[in-house]
Amino acid sequence: MTWGRQHRRDHVDRYAPLLSMVVAMLLAVLVLPSALNVPQSNPSQTLEFAPVPPEDDEPPPPDVANVESLGLGSSAGPAGDGAGSGAAALPPPPAAPPVGAGGRPVTKRCVGDPPRQTEDPLAPPCVAHFEGDNFGATYQGVTADEIRVLLYFDGSPPGTPRPTTSRGSENIPGDQFFDLGEEPQGDEFVNVRQLRLLQRYFNERYQTYGRTVRFVVHFGNPDDTPESRRADATAGATDWEPFAVIAFGRENVSDYVDEMAQRDVVNVLGRDIISYEGRAGRAEDFYRGHPARIWSYDPSLDRRVELFASHACTKAAPHPASFSGNPGDNGQPRSFGIVLPDDPDAPEANTYGAMIRTALEQCGIEFDGVATVASASTGLCRGQSEAIATLSEFRQTGVTTIVKAGGFEVCYSQAAATLGYRPEWLVPGDSVNDANIYSRQQDQTAWAFARAVSTHPVGTVLDEEVCFQAQREADPSTPRSDARFGCGYYDELRQLFTGIQVAGPRLTPENMDRGFHAIPAIQAGDPRIPACFYRPGDYSCVKDAQALWWDPTGQAPGRGEAGCWRIVENGRRYLPGDWPPGDIDAQRTTDDPCNGNPAEELS
């Protein structure tokens, strides 16, 4: 089979543009939350480490240390600048790697003390050099020289102009594969261009044990029905035999992931800025249906519920109302209402809402008002009269505090404004309602009384994000308008390359599973760095969150629009059950900075 061939089918429909939210991580000075934390006896040395030893029949020689028995050498510290440029196909590995102190070859440019693989605070501990047997074809899509990875996007009919980039309005491919192990072909779409840069960057900086990770980009059938998703997965798995896939599609992408997992392909879940499912994530049962075959960097719905419920149950339920805009509410016992998604087009939103309600009731919160909304994924208002009637009942009942339990719609904030009703709003993080770009669409006179729990770390301007710097390292001329697309894929690629590195030379899903679960369950103590680890039987990484409050007049970094989520305690992050004492606003100050989401907000 020719890996570079393109495959076309003749189905056309519509395209949902890809923009994923970027998680900002900068300038770590502490031990990394995702690091496999190994003591460093000498800071000037790079300790070669992988958690998964090769399963050789013969024991290592008696004079070889435990670390070296993993098939890894020990080398001196970082050497060389390692910077690449351009968007061409990957270069061949050097015939003779540079030599570090002591005569040991050093093939990766590690940084920091203790050394880690890249400047990214979430990069794993450094494995600067590998020499020895990588065991060849250890799994499908893996050879002694290569690891094939498929990146899946929604397709679009040819000739349809969509996103605006440095090259103007670009046409999105449909039903087509691009092999990034080959030279660029013509005027490639922006996703393909930026993935070429990230392919270069991650291969040059991460340890892949003598193999090159080769990207194949698939723009699928524009028909996004479950049947088409599964057909796309079948085509990708059959024609390309990937070791792993990252799926960034919109509606019904879970069918694609499920089909790939059934074929024993490793999946890293990608985010999508349009679909609720692609932003909020999936419940843990979805991951556990295919153990060690489905992973994510972002938290599962269960983890989001755990974080929100622990906050609401300790910071709201035991305390009187404190930030309501209704006369007479503050100082009175809180009376809770809840708005639940009930949208057939947003099953994940419905699941999330039901899970939130159950968790809050389990900690003793009783709801004096319950409402459902049928347009939970549209951002539109399709039931204004119903929302007004419901909130009128809430006000008459004395509801002081409303839980906005997942989904995205604007009816209820608009209805509250129409009624002059200013209750407290509690907002669970779902990468939608806790994002500036969406909360600006709520009625600002009502949303001024909103508080949220968010797994987003502190964000800044695009130029300072590690995802942007990675693309600029691969090509210093990368336009900012194009880099925002690459930033939409960075977190998932880092997670996959981390899995490949911690799996060790014998690459299999089981060894990746062992490596991921060897990541210590610790926090970095830095608001820019999420706690990222995997509990037993758990396959989503981020485990902590920060508290936010909405300021209709604030401005996010690098933005001119009014309205931002302000971060309490400069974005200090908490694990479930560790929230500080006092009411929700006990730690809030008027000087709390605005959070930023540069990838989705760059215009």
Image (cartoon, rainbow, N blue to C red):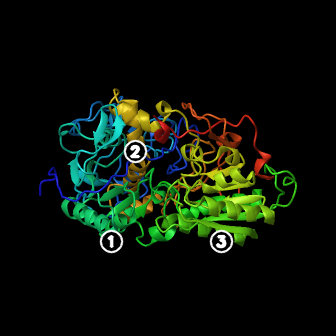
Quadrant where the C terminus lies? top left
Position of 509 relative to 153 (above/below): below
Answer with the quarter of the image where residue 56 lies. bottom left
The residue pinned by badge 2 equals: 127
Q: What amino acid is found at the position of numbered circle 3 in the picture? A: Thr
Q: Residues within 10 Å of mark 1 (few under 14, many from 20)?
A: few
The residue pinned by badge 3 equals: 358
In percent of width and height, residue 478 lies at: 35, 30
59 displayed left or right of 279: left
Residue 454 shows in this picture: yes
In percent of width and height, residue 546 lies at: 64, 48
Q: How many marks?
A: 3
437 displayed left or right of 369: left
446 displayed left or right of 45: right
Element carrying mark 3:
helix
Q: CA distance from mark 3 to mark 1?
A: 31 Å
Position of 289 relative to 23 (above/below): below
Camera-side residue of 52 and 261: 261
Q: What amino acid is found at the position of numbered circle 1 in the picture? A: Gln
Residue 262: mark: 1
Q: CA distance from mark 2 to mark 1?
A: 32 Å
Q: What amino acid is found at the position of numbered circle 2 in the picture? A: Val
In percent of width and height, residue 410 lies at: 59, 53
In percent of width and height, residue 364 lies at: 76, 70
